[in-house]
Image (cartoon, rainbow, N blue to C red):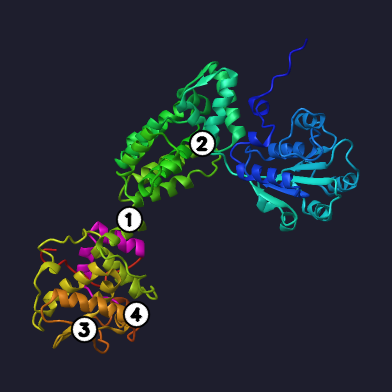
Amino acid sequence: MPEEPYLVLARKWRPQAFDDVIGQVHITRTLQNAIEAGRIGHAFLFIGSRGIGKTTTARVLAKALNCTAGDSATPNPCGECDNCTAIAAGNSMDVIEIDGASNNSVEDVRQIRENVRLVPSQSRYKIYVIDEVHQLSSSAFNALLKTLEEPPEHAIFIMATTESHKVPATIISRCQRYDFRRVSLDDLIALLKRVLANETVTATDEALRAIARASDGGVRDAESILEQLVTYCDKTIEFKDVVDVLGLVDWAVLNEMAEAILAQDVGAALHIVEQVTASGKDLSQFVQDLLGHYRNMLICKTTDAKDLLGLPEEDLAALKQQSETYSLTKLIRLVEQFAELTKDFDSQLAQRIALESLLIRISKVSVEMSIDAILEKLVQLGAGGIAGAPDPPSSTTQRSVGAAVLAEALPMEPISESTDTPNSKPGITVSNDNLREHWLTITHAIAQENLKVGVALGRAHPSGIDGDALCIAFTDANKPSRESLERVDSRSVIDTLLQSLTANLRTYKIEGNREPSPANSMSETDNDNPGKTSRHHVAAKDAEEAMTDPHVAKVVEVFRGEIVDIKHPPPGA
């Protein structure tokens, strides 16, 4: 007697009833209830990624509708009658499975329209299962519309697709839509354990979890991977076997790479890349693993990751500990950079060069000075938070002033609440004689409370003291800042700070526009345009000296600005 042909695990363990379909209870329960209530639709659209049970559910539904064990359709097909066995084997005359990729023309649809009129030969319904329906041409879809909307009573259409956005809305509106979900790790692991128990093969929990993670929620992928490992390992599957068969990178290697990046050790990072390449691993998979590693760290740093990641307790603890060594800005930046590297490359060499270039770049602070890092410094400086967006950069003057403020902010740490800060003093008495001396102290304290208001005040010029009011003035170029300080919310911030900081000032007054000083009314570049107001407020020698500070130079370069003012922190700050 000839031996039965070998069936791969994905076919051997294909669900034969609704209760066997894992991870799709929201769909199977709805279909069972509809059948039991006799509310059977004439067209169904199954949507979801590959290998999660769309075609399998379509076959089970066909069996439920055509099972002859009872007088009508049943939510629990017997699986033993002629119709059930024929549908399971794929040779039922009344259940026609069509591949949309190879039968996508108008002629193919016309043939369906002609055949659909014929009554079933031995079943209640003639059922058409169209897989990958999005592959049909536009004209084929149009030809199917009328039949899909008003089919004969004995005809039912079940369509499946992985790309619902390619299915015309006119088709979707004529169907009952069911969205299939990716299967959870726990459900996949439970399925793999049942399969292994019947195959008399054992596997460690760590290996099963690695298989489930590698399948990315796909049942067919999980069973296919398990098939490979059963062949490779014979009787016992361990985590190392999964790593070897799938070409995965061990978690320890990812951890070493993360430590090398954190330590800015270019040599160690490149050495790890060399080891991964020499071991025959796919570099694109390595980049994907690195991206996943940093994504997991980002989740651990920002929320409770236990339910989101589904990792063992020891892995979660290690990820949590490692995430604490990175700043949030750094993690977000790394995720974005490694995500860019996941794009297709023409060769392994191109992928390696791109990866090594990225590792070198992120390991060099001088090269990796990003806008994010500058903003993080500003947030630290403004302990009270940024109350609103800065004034619109409507001119080069505003951009230049912003660059000067950033240049001043970068080398400074957040002002601590110590006995040396102005906020802790009983109050300073400000007069016309010492106004210039205390002006910088006042602007710094207000910037610490509200960065936007502090920047706007820093663009003003102190003109004197009038009773309990500080008098300030603006040039025409700083009109937006003047308007900002005229608002009620800005006045409230400054009044409160003046009252707590000084012994005699309670508010401020904005006087008429201040004319630029004659000495600086024209710049060297404005000689040909005498009517143009200068933007320069510092001597060229002082500006060159300020540019020797690498932080200042970097900010001026990033924002394409120029130095218009130089301020020094107050004593003790």
Placement of 60 over or under 34, stated as above or below:
above
Q: Which residue is mark 2?
A: 185
Q: Residue at x 19, y 74 (%)?
A: 497
For disc 3, the neighbor class at 10 Å (few under 14, some 14 to 19, many from 20) is some
Q: Which mark is first along the chain, 2 or 3?
A: 2
**Residue occupying the far top of the picture:** 1
In this rendering, the label closer to the viewer, 2 or 1 = 2
Going from N to C along the chain, the mark reached first, 2 or 1, is 2
Q: Which range of residues does the magenta coloring cover?
A: 535-559
Instruction: Categorize mark 4 by other alpha carbons within 10 Å: few (<14), some (14-19), many (20+).
Output: some
Q: Which residue is mark 3?
A: 508
Q: Amino acid at mark 3?
A: Tyr
Place of residue 533 in the rendered image (x, y in percent of width and height, measured from the top left) = 31, 83
Q: Please tell me whether mark 4 sits on a helix, a strand or a loop.
A: helix
Which sits earlier in the primary sequence, circle 3 or circle 4? 4
What residue is disc 4 on?
Answer: 480
Measure the C-alpha gap from mark 1 to mark 4: 27 Å
Dot 2 amino acid type: Leu
Which kind of residue does numbered mark 4 sit on?
Answer: Pro
Provide the secondary structure element on which disc 2 rests: helix
| Tag 1 residue | 373
Measured in 3D between alpha carbons, the distance from the residue under mark 3 to the one under mark 4, in whole angstroms, is 18 Å
